[in-house]
Amino acid sequence: MALNKKGSRRITVDGIEYRWRIRRKPSYMQGLCWTPMTYAVEAAGGSQPGTTLIVTSGQAHPSNWVGAEAVPNRPAHVAASIREARDRGWEPTKAGSPFQLDRSAGFIAQP
């Protein structure tokens, strides 16, 4: 699975370039703040797409429908997620199923 280049941002972590993207429109569950925001990361460049990293953050989607405060997802958070996923076995250049990283501890769903 490859990320759309449109809307994605580049980040370099430990000398390797990646692209990351937050879905523009929240899913139904994210829009109601029942589930936290997710974003996708993949290695930039290369002739073949590798494994995509799917990060579940501990924050509400910025475009949620209930007006819950959303903290911006900063590049430092993305870099920390990439490092944690690599430590847990994510290999971004090898083909395979998406690698899930759950960083949603402390997320409180809206009633």
Image (cartoon, helix red, strand yellow):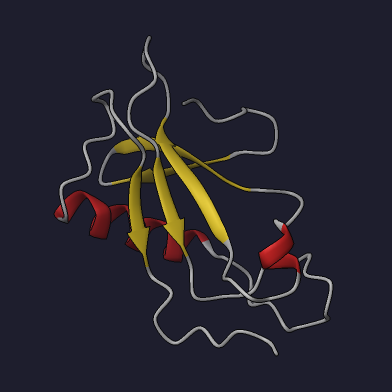
Image point (62%, 28%), residue name: 4
Image point (43%, 56%), residue name: 55
Count of numbered circles in the view? 0
Q: Is residue 94 above or below residue 27?
A: above
Locate residue 26: give its quadrant. Answer: bottom right
Q: Is residue 75 above or below residue 36?
A: above
Image point (15%, 55%), residue name: 87
Residue 103 on image: x %, y %: 38, 70
Left or right of 72 in this view: 106: left
Image point (48%, 68%), residue name: 57
Residue 10 on image: x %, y %: 52, 39
Residue 48 on image: x %, y %: 37, 13
Closer to the camera, 52 or 5? 52
Residue 88 on image: x %, y %: 16, 55
Q: Is residue 52 above or below residue 48?
A: below
Locate residue 99: give its quadrant. Answer: top left
Locate residue 8: give its quadrant. Answer: top right
Q: Quadrant of the C terminus?
A: bottom right
Left or right of 31 in this view: 51: left
Q: Is residue 92 above or below residue 38?
A: above
Left or right of 110 in this view: 107: left
